[in-house]
Image: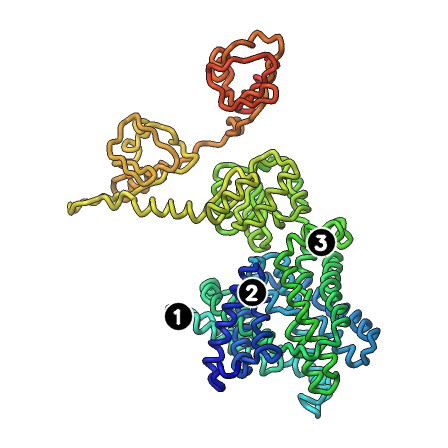
């Protein structure tokens, strides 16, 4: 392969690696494999154990470090001090608890395999550290970074990172690598002092420097993004120089901007650059895997890999269960520690350089890293299905009262809930607002604690949870709800939700959101009654807005009048009224010029033309009068307790064997006129007659399928059989 590479040409080398990554990534995508696994394969193939394409290791490593810095910076942007306070206790307890228990158990396993005490200690400590970079990438891809289990996982992974840094400082001090004149305790105290100074500097800048600087820079979006990248890399470098890690420095850089109004704009524009640079991290990791050291370690690596993949999550689940979290939250968080990290490999390399361990132990750590990173990636991507299988066996990890998530349990006691709505993001929140305006009783469900806190302050009943969780669904008042609605555009989640509702014999209606028509068809097949297509609906509404009537005003007469278009909202007091009944000019002094219905403008407005929700009324008058007309048309129909519920009921009405109505036609029975119900079908033995005509003749033993209001159905059922 060497004759294809121009030695010393770094640009050509990186171009070759990118081409190889594209090819292997495409094959992996076709085979439905995670990109992380594909990129690791690229690193192994391009590294010394494969084709030996990479010579500029320093350049690849530099790009990898910048990618890691941006990744942790974006994570820090999403966190603020309120979130840290929310999950700080569980993150600290879980992070430290998992490090302690994993290192102790791993140490005794290594001793049983006849490793020397120092080698066993290195292996045990290496098993405790999990990859923050890989977990954050996977959680971001699954859109679970803001979930409770996502935030807890990030919290204890950062605790692990700090523990790893302190461990390496201590080991280096013991080996005389930092300063042979200072004892290990002095080194630890020094690094703690540096850490406090580092935090103090960032806090000072957050208070007095960054707000003013960002306000000036934000006038240019390009300059704002450039500053964000520079800030992330600068603090990453400063953290590394002070003896911490680049990860900690970059993470603190993100937190320093998390409370500003610019964090969303910065985060959105850095995602693509972050993902591109992270490719080099996975390639760099793959090139470090030397398979020549691994052959004799397969059996031992298998044992340690099972311990990491199974034992580490169980330790986290046990700690979180004791702290009062539900087993699903513990399970999802625990999967974040089902692999060892790049810190583990660095720790092993440090041990080799200090003469504490030999290449045998290093080869074992390397092989465990390969196995656990690949396996845990699949476990996290399929966490929902995995939990569904294992859930019955995980009950021992949940207290009888998981009080940390008590909000979900309290929701079961709610009465009068009409609609259970899952997903309180932007789209879901807008739907809730409109439902509350219509007097509906809504229970909101989300797994983002911030969304729940915001809605709870507004008085909305809320519950923390995931609609694809079977146990959580049992805690909701599903049996009393008329609708279960998911505004989350996730096919797997919605499909699972619909199947769970079907197995629980939910009698109400189901509405879910879809990305496109193909997904909508799939969800209809699973039993969805209503499909939301947010992008499609928004596009239709936008196209209506682009054809608004104010564009139709022509001419150059200077007159103090304005033309405006007002949409008649659902629930309007004037819905269904004729134009002659509006009395708009008498009440507000405004003229109704035309009506815009679905983008078509009607100028010939006859007095008996009725108006309906969704119609756009084109008004002309002075600005003040037009504003008054908008408020007049926005009047809502009062919602009294005695109003007739807008709910239809489907029921069966039997025709008795001796009924005098046998032999009569449906037209003779006058069901609609006399009973306010409509016959929509007839069951005759095994035959189903759908949409029978008025001339259809009844027979004794027939069952009529009728639909009407609840009150009308109750009245006619009181007279059955016919």
Question: Relative to residue 613, is residue 139 depicted above or below?
Answer: below
Residue annotated with mark 3: 327
Residue in front for this viewpoint, 542 or 39: 39
Residue in front for this viewpoint, 464 or 287: 287
- Callout in the foreground (2, 3): 2
Q: CA distance from mark 3 to mark 1?
A: 45 Å
Residue 160 in sight: no
Q: CA distance from mark 2 to mark 3?
A: 29 Å
Question: Relative to residue 263, is residue 650 depicted above or below?
Answer: above
**Crowd tier of the residue under label 2, counting other residues whose Cα lies within 10 Å: few below 14, some 14–19, many 20 or above:** many
Query: Which quadrant of the structure image shows residue 573?
Result: top left
Does dot 3 land on a helix, a strand or a loop? Answer: helix
Residue at position x 45%, y 80% from top?
11
Do tag 2 and tag 3 residues touch (Cβ < 8 Å)? no
**Crowd tier of the residue under label 1, counting other residues whose Cα lies within 10 Å: few below 14, some 14–19, many 20 or above:** few
Across and down, in percent, residue 49 comes to 62, 78
Residue furthest out toward the bottom: 181
Across and down, in percent, residue 211 comes to 46, 70
Query: Which quadrant of the structure image shows residue 364?
Result: bottom right
Residue 648 in sight: yes
Query: Which quadrant of the structure image shows residue 483?
Result: top right
Q: Which mark is residue 222?
A: 1
Q: CA distance from mark 2 to mark 1?
A: 29 Å
In the displayed structure, does residue 333 sit left or right of residue 232? Answer: right
Residue annotated with mark 2: 35
Q: Which callout, 2 or 3, points at the residue further toward the start of the chain? A: 2
Across and down, in percent, residue 555 comes to 16, 45
Question: Relative to residue 363, is residue 651 depicted above or below?
Answer: above
Does dot 2 land on a helix, a strand or a loop? Answer: helix
In the displayed structure, does residue 64 sit left or right of residue 110? Answer: left
Does dot 1 land on a helix, a strand or a loop? Answer: helix
């Amino acid at each position: 392969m060497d004759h294809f590479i121009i030695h010393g040409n770094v640009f050509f080398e990186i171009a070759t690696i990118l081409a190889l990554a594209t090819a292997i990534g495409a094959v992996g995508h076709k085979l439905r494999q995670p990109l992380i696994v594909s990129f690791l394969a690229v690193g192994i193939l391009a590294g010394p154990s494969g084709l030996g394409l990479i010579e500029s290791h320093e350049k690849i490593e530099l790009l990898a470090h910048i990618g890691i810095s941006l990744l942790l910076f974006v994570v820090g942007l999403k966190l603020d001090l309120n979130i840290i306070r929310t999950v700080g206790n569980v993150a600290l307890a879980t992070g430290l608890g998992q490090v302690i228990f994993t290192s102790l158990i791993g140490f005794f396993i290594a001793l049983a395999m006849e490793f020397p005490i120092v080698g066993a200690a290195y292996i045990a400590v290496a098993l405790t550290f999990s990859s923050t970079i890989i977990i954050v990438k996977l959680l971001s891809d699954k859109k679970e970074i803001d979930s409770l289990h996502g935030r807890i996982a990030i919290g204890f992974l950062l605790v692990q990172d700090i523990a790893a840094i302190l461990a390496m400082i201590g080991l280096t001090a013991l080996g005389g690598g930092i300063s042979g004149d200072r004892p290990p305790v002095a080194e630890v105290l020094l690094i703690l002092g540096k850490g406090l100074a580092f935090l103090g500097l960032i806090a000072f800048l957050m208070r007095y420097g960054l707000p003013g600087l960002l306000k000036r820079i934000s006038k240019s979006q390009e300059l704002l993004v450039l500053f964000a990248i520079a800030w992330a890399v600068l603090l990453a470098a400063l953290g590394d120089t002070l003896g911490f890690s680049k990860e900690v420095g970059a993470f603190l850089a993100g937190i320093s901007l998390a409370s500003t109004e610019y964090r969303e704009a910065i985060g959105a524009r850095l995602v693509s650059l972050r993902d591109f640079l992270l490719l080099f991290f996975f390639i760099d990791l793959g090139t470090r895997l030397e398979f020549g050291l691994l052959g004799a370690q397969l059996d031992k690596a298998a044992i340690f890999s099972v311990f990491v993949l199974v034992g580490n999550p169980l330790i986290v689940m046990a700690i979180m269960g004791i702290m009062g979290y539900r087993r699903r939250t513990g399970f999802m968080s625990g999967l974040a520690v089902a692999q060892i990290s790049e810190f583990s490999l660095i720790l092993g390399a440090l041990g080799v350089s200090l003469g504490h361990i030999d290449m045998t132990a290093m080869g074992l750590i390397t092989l465990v890293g390969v196995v656990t990173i690949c396996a845990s990636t699949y476990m996290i991507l399929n966490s929902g299905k995995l939990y569904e299988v294992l859930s019955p066996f995980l009950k021992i990890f949940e207290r009888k009262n998981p009080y940390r998530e008590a909000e979900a349990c309290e929701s079961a006691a709610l009465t009068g809930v009409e609609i259970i709505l899952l997903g309180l993001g932007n789209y879901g929140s807008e739907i809730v607002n409109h439902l509350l305006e219509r007097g509906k009783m809504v229970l909101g469900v989300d797994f983002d604690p911030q969304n729940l806190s915001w809605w709870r302050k507004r008085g909305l009943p809320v519950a923390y949870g995931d609609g694809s969780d079977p146990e959580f669904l049992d805690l909701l008042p599903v049996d009393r709800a008329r609708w279960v609605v998911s505004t989350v555009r996730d096919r797997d989640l919605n499909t699972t939700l619909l199947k769970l509702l079907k197995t629980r014999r939910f009698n109400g209606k189901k509405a879910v959101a879809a990305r496109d028509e193909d997904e909508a068809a799939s969800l209809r097949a699973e039993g969805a009654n209503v499909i939301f297509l947010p992008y499609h609906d928004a596009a239709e509404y936008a196209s209506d807005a682009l054809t608004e009537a104010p564009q139709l005003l022509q001419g150059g007469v200077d007159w103090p009048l304005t033309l405006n278009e007002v949409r008649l909202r659902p629930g309007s007091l004037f819905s269904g009224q004729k134009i002659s009944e509006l009395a708009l000019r008498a009440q507000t002094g405004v003229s109704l010029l035309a009506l815009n219905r679905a983008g078509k403008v009607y100028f010939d407005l006859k007095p008996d033309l009725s108006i309906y929700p969704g119609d756009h009324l084109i008004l002309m008058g002075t600005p003040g009068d037009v504003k008054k007309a908008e408020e007049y048309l926005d009047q809502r129909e009062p919602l009294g307790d005695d109003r007739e519920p807008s709910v239809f009921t489907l029921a069966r009405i039997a025709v008795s064997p001796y009924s005098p109505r046998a032999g009569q036609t449906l037209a003779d029975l006058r069901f609609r006129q006399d009973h306010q119900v409509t016959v929509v079908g007839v069951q005759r033995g095994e035959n189903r007659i759908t949409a029978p005509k008025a001339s259809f003749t009844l027979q004794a033993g027939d069952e009529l399928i009728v639909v009407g209001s609840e009150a009308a159905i109750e009245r006619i059922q009181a007279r059955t059989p016919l």
